[in-house]
Image (spheres, rainbow, N blue to C red):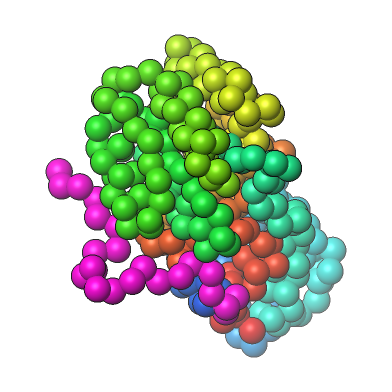
Amino acid sequence: MGLFNPFKKSEEQPTPPVEEQPSGFFSRLKQGLVKTSRVLNTDIRDLFKQEGRLVDDEFLTELFAILVRTDMGVGPAGKIRDQVKTDFRGRVVHLSEVLATVKTELVALMQQPETPIQFAESGPTVVMVVGVNGSGKTTSIAKLAAYLKSQGKSVVLGAGDTFRAAAVEQLSIWADRLGVDIVKAEQGSDPASVAFKAVDFALQNNKDVVILDTAGRLQTQTNLMNELDKIRRVAGKKIEAAPHEVLLVLDATAGQNGISQAKGFSEAAQCTGIILTKLDGTAKGGVVVPIRQTFNLPVKYIGVGETPEDFALFNAEQFGDALFADAF
């Protein structure tokens, strides 16, 4: 298999800036959520075979089934259905009325303050990134690096997934493209030693942020979970309170299965936030809701594509607006 090559373009073309006008990312978010939006908007619209529809048990059952298909979970889907029942039962309603209630309740269930990286008061901020295999961890690290660089931060990457040569190579390609420093070691090296070297490099060179990659693993793999503890301890010896953030990367296409897989993992790794990836590849965008409720962690960032421009802070209102942009 060939190396993944981010933004395949000629060297003369500069990498575009990540920070754009809000409308720029909104259009990407809207496009990325089109599969989920289609389930919500088109399928709910299909409930209205004529201009109005009586809100009765049959209607509420059909609405509930549509909501569950977005992978928001039975509990949240039931809450939204019950609110529609409270507002409209026994009435003939129009599509726009039902969609407005669904949107309001959905945004309320996802609600949280925007939660960017919490930077250290002084010295480098250390961010450890963890997740199960295949979640999009390495690509998310590159996107986060580009995002932070666009904010004027100097970034160092620590290629701590020393088990997979391809992961180090992929991260090296990103580092070269983005113009950020990377610290790496031979395949099979102790990941904690990479973390030590990366943090030390940041200290010696006055860098703002260190992002540490780690090998994908499951919470049941005790030796690998112990390895995360070792990485944390090593980072903490170099910089007090490090790592300052531990971000869990979750693949939205895995839906509820990914949530159950990662729950124990997030607790064992002492995660502080979530990066939700691959929203553009699924109709399960509703999975944001159970993620918020299951983990008691903020969804800090979301990804809706392969390039750095497809990555931004999660905002519940913006997410809801994108889902229902063509509904009214």
Q: Is residue 293 magenta?
A: no
Residue 149 versus residue 217 in the image, above or below: below
Q: Position of residue 22 (x, y in %)?
A: 60, 75
Determine the residue positioned at 36% across, 68% down: 15
Quick one: 183 or 56, which is closer to the camera? 183
The answer to whether residue 282 shows anywhere in this view is no
Q: Main secondary structure of the magenta part?
A: loop
- Furthest toward the bottom, the residue is 51
- In the displayed structure image, the side of residue 281 where residue 130 appears, left or right: right
Tell me the quadrant of the picture where the C terminus can be found.
bottom right
- In the displayed structure image, the side of residue 104 where residue 116 appears, left or right: left
- In the displayed structure image, the side of residue 63 where residue 18 appears, left or right: left
- Furthest toward the left, the residue is 1
Q: Position of residue 299 (x, y in %)?
A: 63, 49
- In the displayed structure image, the side of residue 27 where residue 271 appears, left or right: right
Determine which quarter of the picture holds residue 248.
Answer: top right
The answer to whether residue 6 shows anywhere in this view is yes
Determine which quarter of the picture holds residue 297.
Answer: top right
Quick one: 1 or 293, which is closer to the camera? 1
Quick one: 16 or 301, which is closer to the camera? 16
Q: Position of residue 52 (x, y in %)?
A: 68, 83
In the image, the segment drawn in magenta is 1-23
Quick one: 178 or 328, which is closer to the camera? 178
Q: Position of residue 125 (x, y in %)?
A: 61, 40
Tell me the quadrant of the picture where the N terminus can be found.
top left
- Furthest toward the front, the residue is 204
Determine which quarter of the picture holds residue 281.
Answer: bottom left
Residue 88 versus residue 177 in the image, above or below: below
Residue 223 versus residue 26 in the image, above or below: above
